[in-house]
Image: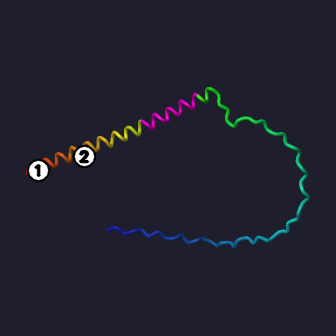
Amino acid sequence: MFRPKVPTMPQPTGLTTPPAVVEPTAVTPQAPAPASTVATPARNRPAVQLTPGTVLALVGGGTAVVLVVGAVLVSMLLAVALTAASVAVCALTVRSVIARR
């Protein structure tokens, strides 16, 4: 009824050219580069500058993340509790039906 289609490898068309031959070249050393001038030291300042606005944004963002993760975890716990309660009710119902027979 169903016949599988076996994929076939496509055959190359036309002539292929051989790879180009790479010939070695001689390396000639050059004169060393002149010494660079002394760099001035950079000022010591923190990589991230925290202003009151950025601190407030970070605290607000962290609070939002904690609240969202907490809500997700609480909803998952509630789902597990509801599932366990419904399975327990089903088990009691089946047990009472079997006991009456």
**How far from the left and from the top, in percent, is residue 64?**
49, 32
Tell which circle, 2 or 1, labels the residue nearer the N-terminal end: 2
Location of residue 47 (image quadrant): top right
Q: What residue is drawn where x is 58% and y is 28%?
A: 56
Helix, strand or loop at disc 1? Answer: helix
**How far from the left and from the top, in percent, is residue 38?**
87, 44
Q: Is residue 45 above or below residue 9?
A: above
Q: Which residue, given by chain and number where applicable, does mark 2 sit on?
A: 87
Q: What residue is drawn where x is 52% and y is 70%?
A: 9
Q: Is residue 69 left or right of residue 40?
A: left
Q: What residue is drawn where x is 75% and y is 72%?
A: 21
Q: Which mark is residue 99?
A: 1
**How far from the left and from the top, in percent, is residue 72?**
41, 38
Q: What residue is drawn where x is 13% and y is 47%?
A: 96
Q: Where are the magenta residues, as a range?
A: 56-70
Please state which amino acid type lies under the numbered disc 1.
Answer: Ala
Disc 2 crowd, CA 10 A, few/some/many (<14, 14-19, 20+): few
Cα distance between the residues tagged 2 and 1:
18 Å
